[in-house]
Image: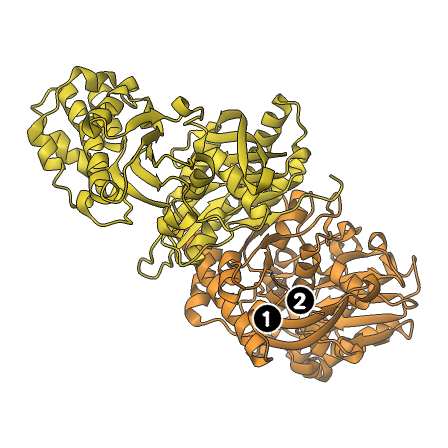
Chain colours: A yellow, B orange
């Protein structure tokens, strides 16, 4: 039995996700129990500094150097908080897996700039302040091996969600949608993953413009609208949907410019219909990708949805309707996991794997040439 | 027997120093043999990018992210080159200790900017490309423990230069002068270190202005001049010389403004006399510090000089005259070591210590609260 903490702070700058795990390894099979999960918001001053460090105009080496240490202190405080809440000393942790804050991520070379990635949140500070061993900087080794440094969750999905009999799809619906295909009793070589297209990105952007809200809570606005078939048909012509796998996308395809176009061209439609149509668009891109790249290879038993989109009941209903009984549509919570905690759990588990010197990227998902041991190990002072 | 490579690239941007070592540990005593040493110059384009990343106006997160990976590739090439030259496969190395290129180092908090340090040269790239385990980012853990992150060489000086019977001073004369005090059979607690004042900084600056040369080769210009006692007396009033230890200094005290003052106020003196006087000034600050902080505590047998200043024969003669037979004045080469290789050797050895999970900072030298294990460990792919 090993206590492990996983730390994740994403590009949304919501704060730090902290998962406290108990990992056991009876007969060589890693088993993970989520003991506790917390999200700690960033102070406004830290959000400012992160935004500054993300800006090409306002970032510089001094800011990045200083913020790396400040985030280390903050991450250490998060670890100590969740340990203290659960009556554990942080120095009892077997390992802390810390993703860090991404300051830059460029999976391909662009002009003079090398393919590279940079996460900050100094592991030496975390290790010193907590008394625990830290594994951090997970994405760099996958990129050194020619991969895109993302997604890194598929390996942990294999450990956590592999079923001896069921073929499962792990569909994450964040800003972008991405799926991990997990055949029953799969080996690492049989796992593959790709982006399916938009997740909540277009819906959220339109909700902001039309309703001054960050997202469509429970999918209630979509529920009250009607899908416009002309708009949906236009959207479905996007070449990304039929592009071969592996594939990945982001704001460059379904970001502000995309929404601008819909917002102006279809401004005559009722606001609710726009939301309903974009919700259906997300569902259709997901199912279309399954039909092209998954169903011809295997029958799927369960689609397990995570991410903010898993709380959108209309989106889940659309998905179930389109799948037409081919497979069950479940949420993380339906099978006893936490959607919110998923990434923090993943980085705790990746830290555990690296501590045991085991490789944990999935080349079919990242495009890396080989399995590699992710991240680097920082030791606490010996007094612990 | 373990092959180890140490990599160092300093703020002078001369290039990468590469030391290939053979480390043995018979009866628990670490013994280091320098097999080979090379310096590889940086390409002009890399020097440009490093300068850009050192500039607050021109650095940004994208540049630092990209340069971190480019330097990783370059460092890996250096390792492979020295291994191939010596008939060794890089994947046979027990460890690579890589200092990295310092992009920012701020030992104390300044305004909103945290005390912090940042070295780049991605260890994942070095480990992947060479097939060897890499230890890097040595300075951060000492700073996490409240230290200044420098100097880190004293621990390796203890391992390499400790004598069972002789009390030794290791005097480095780079831009700044610094000394490590190494009593016979010393334990870590008995070692201390501090900056003595200017090294070659003022001499080099004046050589550039007066003779259009980078430095006073062998001390020949100083040799042809006469020490001006009035100027020397004024210089010796500098409060740093009598400041209590531990103390450290840099360009803020003996940099361009300092030389400007001498250059304008003493412009009537022959150029050779200015050089001779500043050479004597360096020698006097060193000996004055010994008289205040070392000689009252112990008799010193040997002063072992390293750094560019060890090639300045006039400076060594001045030192010997001022010490007046109290102790022998030797160079690294006199005792079978290489002055040029000293820092690269140090980081190879520090990497070796971290690989064995042994602490290697010297709190008396850095001001850290305790002994800590420096740096983080990055593993190569398992195929090696």
Q: Chain of mark 1?
A: B
Figure disc tally = 2
Q: CA distance from mark 2 to mark 1?
A: 8 Å
**Residue B150 in the image, given as x and y percentages of width and height:** 68, 54
Could you say whether the residue bearing mark 2 is in a helix, strand or loop?
helix
Q: In the figure, is residue A289 to the left or right of A139?
A: left
* Quarter where residue A301 is shown: top left
Residue at the image position 69 percent from the left and 47 percent from the top: B147
Residue at the image position 39 percent from the left and 51 percent from the top: A189
Q: In the figure, is residue B114 to the left or right of A326?
A: right
The reply to whether discs 2 and 1 touch (Cβ–Cβ < 8 Å) is yes
Q: Earlier in the sequence, mark 2 or mark 1?
A: 1
Q: Inspect this view and state whether residue B230 appears.
A: no
**Residue A357 in the image, given as x and y percentages of width and height:** 57, 51
Could you say whether the residue bearing mark 1 is in a helix, strand or loop?
strand
Q: Inspect this view and state whether residue A230 appears.
A: yes
Q: Who is closer to the viewer here, A371 or A40?
A: A371
Say above or below: A134 vs B136. above
Q: Chain of mark 2?
A: B
Q: Which residue is mark 2?
A: B343
* Quarter where residue B226 is shown: bottom right
Say above or below: B311 vs A341. below
Q: Who is closer to the viewer here, A173 or B312?
A: A173
Q: Who is closer to the viewer here, A47 or A225?
A: A225
Q: Who is closer to the viewer here, A96 or B171?
A: A96
Q: In the figure, is residue B319 to the left or right of B70?
A: right
**Which numbered disc covers residue A250?**
none
Residue at the image position 20 percent from the left and 43 percent from the top: A292
Q: In the figure, is residue B332 to the left or right of A357?
A: right
Q: Which residue is mark 1?
A: B17
Say above or below: A345 vs B241. above
Looking at the figure, which quarter contains the N terminus of chain A?
top right
């Amino acid at each position: 039995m090993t206590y492990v903490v996983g730390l994740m702070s994403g590009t949304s700058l919501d704060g730090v996700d902290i998962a406290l795990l108990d990992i056991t390894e009876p007969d060589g099979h890693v088993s993970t129990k989520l003991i506790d999960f917390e999200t700690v918001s960033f102070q406004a001053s830290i959000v400012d500094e992160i935004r500054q460090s993300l800006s090409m105009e306002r970032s510089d080496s001094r800011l990045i150097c200083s913020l790396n240490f400040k985030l280390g202190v903050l991450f250490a405080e998060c670890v100590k908080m969740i340990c203290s809440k659960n009556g554990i000393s942080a120095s009892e942790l077997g390992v802390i897996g810390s993703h860090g804050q991404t300051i830059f991520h460029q999976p391909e070379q662009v002009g003079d700039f090398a393919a590279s990635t940079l996460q900050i949140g100094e592991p030496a500070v975390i290790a010193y302040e907590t008394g625990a061993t830290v594994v951090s900087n997970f994405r760099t080794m996958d990129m050194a091996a020619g991969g895109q440094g993302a997604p890194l969750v598929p390996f942990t999905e294999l450990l956590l969600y592999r079923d001896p009999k069921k073929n499962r799809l792990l569909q994450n619906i964040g800003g972008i949608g991405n799926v991990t295909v997990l055949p029953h009793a799969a080996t690492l070589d049989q796992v593959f993953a790709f982006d399916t297209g938009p997740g909540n990105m277009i819906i959220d952007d339109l909700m902001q413009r039309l309703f001054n809200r960050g997202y469509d809570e429970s999918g209630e606005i979509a529920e009250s609208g009607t899908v416009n078939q002309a708009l949906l048909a236009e959207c479905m012509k996007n070449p990304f949907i039929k592009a071969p796998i592996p594939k990945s996308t982001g704001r460059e395809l379904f970001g502000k410019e995309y929404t601008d176009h819909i917002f102006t061209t279809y401004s005559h439609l009722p606001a609710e219909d726009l939301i309903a149509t974009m919700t259906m668009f997300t569902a259709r891109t997901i199912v279309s990708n399954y039909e092209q790249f998954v169903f011809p290879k295997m029958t799927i038993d369960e689609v397990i949805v995570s991410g903010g989109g898993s709380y959108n009941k209309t989106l889940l209903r659309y998905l179930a309707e389109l799948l037409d009984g081919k497979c069950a549509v479940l949420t993380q919570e339906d099978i006893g996991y936490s959607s919110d905690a998923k990434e923090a759990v993943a980085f705790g588990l990746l830290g555990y794997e690296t501590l045991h010197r085991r490789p944990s990227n999935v080349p079919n998902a990242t495009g890396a040439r080989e399995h590699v041991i992710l991240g680097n190990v920082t030791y606490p002072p010996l007094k612990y």
